[in-house]
Amino acid sequence: MNKKLFFIAGIFILVLGLFFIFNVSLHNESLKENQFRIVNPHKPEHVRGIHITSWFAGSKKRRQEILKLLNETELNTLVIAIKESDGGVTIPGVELVDKIGSYVSAMPGIEEFVRLLKSNNIYVVARIVVFRDDMLARKKPEFAVKTPGNEIWKDRKGMAWSDPYNKEVWDYNLTVAEHAIDLGFEEIQFDYIRFPSDGDTSLCRYSQNHSSVTSAKALNDFLDLANARLKTLGANISICVFGLTTTRRNDMGIGQNIVEITGKTDFVCPMVYPSHYNKGEYNLPDPNSEPYKTVFVSLSGAKERLGEDYKKLRPYLQDFSLGYKYGPKEVRDQITAAYDNGIYDWTLWDPNCRYTRAALLSNTE
C-alpha cells in the first residue's frame, strides 16, 4: 500500500515539475518575444517634416537649432538617420551590431532627445538605409553582393552592398528597427530598399537567381516580415523609392514597383528631387529649373497609378542646390505642386541639414 502511495506521489510530483518547467519556458519565450517596448505613434494629420543626419542629431547645439525651427514653423516631424549607407548604426545597445562592429557613437543621449521631441509634439521617424551597407558587406562577405569572381561587388562610389535576397540581412536590419522603436521612435523609414543601380550591375551576383520578378518578390517579402515584426510593436512603416517609380511601369531594374510596394507599407516617399531628373524628362527642357512642373507631373503619375493608396504618398522634396540655385520660391513651389495634387504630406531633404526657413509657414499662419 505504501509503495503504491509513493508511486502515485512520485507521478504527481513529476507532473507538477513538468508543468512548472513548461510554464517557465513559455514565460521566457514570451519575454523573448516581447523584449521591446511598444510605441503609440502620435502621427499628425499631415506630416510636414525635415531629415537630419546622425551626426547633426548628436550635436547639442544643432538639436536646439532644429527644435527651434520645428517649434516656430509648420514643421511637425523629424526624420533622423540611424543607419546610413556606409553601414554605421548610430543607436546603442544592438547586440548584433556590436558583434559585427558596425556601431558608431554619433548620437549620445538619443533616447532623451527623442523624448524631448515628443514632449514638443514632434513626430519622430527613424530612417534606416537597408541594402546599401558597405560595412556589413565588408565585415560579413557572405552577406555581400558578389562579382562573377566571388569578390565583393562595389558601386560607382566604391560602396559595397548587402544581398537583398539574404534573410540574415533582413533580420539584421529589422533588429536595428526594433531597437529604434524601443528608444521611442514612432515610425521606421526604410531607404535603399532596392537593388543596386549605379556601377556595372551586370556583374552583380546574388544568392539566388536574379530577375525583375524575383527582385520585386524579395522586397515585398522583406516588407511582409517587417510588418510582422514591427507592427506588433506599434510603429508605422514607410519606404523611400526612386522619383521615377511614380511614372515608370517597370521595376527600373531595382525591384521597385510603386504599386506593389505601396500596398506593403503605411506610407511611401518618392524622392522627387527635380535635380535628379534628366533634361527632357516629362518633356521639360530642364526639370531642375522647373520644380513646380517636375513635382506636379511626378506626383500626378503616382496618384493615377495608386488609386486610393495615393493617400499614403509623402514625397521627399528638394531643399538644396545642385546645378540650379534653390531658394524659398523653388522649395515652396514643390510643396504647392504636392498640394495641387491633393497630397498634403511632405518631407524636405538637404544633405547638409540647413533648411530654408523662409520657405516655411510660421506655426501661427
Image (cartoon, rainbow, N blue to C red):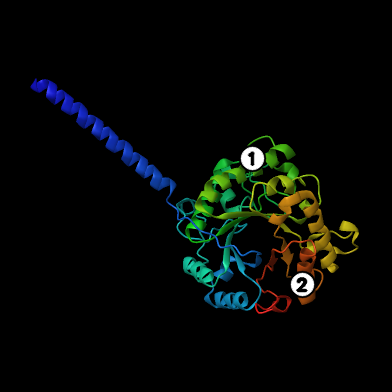
At x 77%, y 65%, the residue is 339
Label 1 element class = loop
Q: Amino acid at mark 2?
A: Arg
**What is the quadrant of the N terminus in the image?**
top left
Residue that mark 1 sits on: 150
User: Measured from the top left, where is residue 150 in percent x and y?
Assistant: 64, 40
User: Measured from the top left, where is residue 248 in percent x and y?
Assistant: 81, 49
User: Measured from the top left, where is residue 340 in percent x and y?
Assistant: 80, 64
| Badge 1 or badge 2: first in the primary sequence | 1
Which of the two discs, 1 and 2, sits closer to the camera? Answer: 2
| Residue 157 seen from this side | no
Q: Amino acid at mark 1?
A: Asn
Q: Measured along the vertical axis of the image, is residue 144 above or below residue 188?
A: above
User: Measured from the top left, where is residue 273 in percent x and y?
Assistant: 76, 63
> What label sits on residue 49 in the rendered view?
none
At x 63%, y 46%, the residue is 152
Depth check, front residue: 280 or 237 = 237
Label 2 element class = helix
Depth check, front residue: 4 or 97 = 4
- Horizontal side of 189 relative to 314 (left or right) equals left
Depth check, front residue: 56 or 23 = 23
Depth check, front residue: 256 or 187 = 187
Q: Residues within 10 Å of mark 1 (few under 14, many from 20)?
A: few
**What is the quadrant of the C terminus in the image?**
bottom right
Q: Residues within 10 Å of mark 2 (few under 14, many from 20)?
A: many
Q: Measured along the vertical axis of the image, is residue 12 above or below residue 138?
A: above
Residue that mark 2 sits on: 332
Q: Quadrant of residue 59?
A: bottom right
Compute the Cα span from label 1 to label 2.
48 Å
